[in-house]
Amino acid sequence: MSPESKQRDAIALLGKSMFDRGLTVGSSGNISVRTEDGGWLMTPTGSCLGRLDPARISKLDAAGAHIAGDKPTVETFLHMAVYEEREAAQAIVHLHSTHSVAVSCLKEVDPTNVLPPITAYYALKVGVLPLVPYIPPGSLDLARAVKELAGKHHAVLLANHGPVVAGKSLEDAVYATEELEETAKLYLMLRGQDARFLTSEQMDDLRERYPDKLGI
């Protein structure tokens, strides 16, 4: 099996895993990965992550032109904007996951860092999560807004829309997205409670202990 075939199968497998666990619904969400030839694989527009056909996943060449498979996601420009700013990114996951979207709608959150460091795992896999103001999905304006933040952050949250997470592998991008969603759920559960979050000293200690676990 060729490396690209393995990537196609991995996209379908992990897409179904996220769909089956309710992390994405209907035809929402999209996934992309870099290929060895310098191009990209992207989930097709209007596709359900729970029922992806590996052979029909879109293929883009190094210039971003669609060359094979079904028509790519309307969020292609968003994915490309992140790749342009993060050379180490090998994959991107964008979902409309319920708890993350709910948090993105709250007026109370800090747009420079939406979620507090509730757990060590979130602190390592996601870290700082900025909020991108609402811009219609699929628009070039949205891609530009994400691009402005992508150079410093491998994960961003789109207001009233959902998370965009880049990783050094598809698995890493998926795991970080899942950690973000669970942390958003915890945040909503803890609202109004006298909660204790990680301190800056504890965060520094984590970074020193596990530098290989940090997001790209």
Image: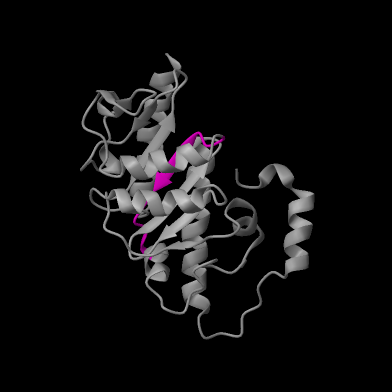
Q: Residue at x 38, y 34 (%)?
A: 11
Relative depth, front residue between 195 and 17: 195
Choose top left, top right, bottom left or bottom right for residue 161: bottom left
Q: Along the line of sight, which residue is nearer the eye, 73 or 186?
A: 73
Residue 144 vs 181, above or below: the answer is above
Is residue 30 a member of the stretch shown in magenta?
no
Picture quarter with the N terminus: top left
Q: Is residue 23 above or below residue 173?
A: below
Left or right: 1 in relation to 154? left
Q: Is residue 160 above or below residue 94?
A: below
Task: Identify the residue at horizontal 53%, vertical 78% (top origin).
Answer: 190
Give the farthest residue toward the top: 1
Magenta residues (range) = 88-98
Q: Is residue 167 left or right of residue 204?
A: left
Q: Please report the residue visible at 35 percent of the width from the left and 22 percent of the height from the top.
A: 61
Instruction: Give the total of numbered labels.
Output: 0
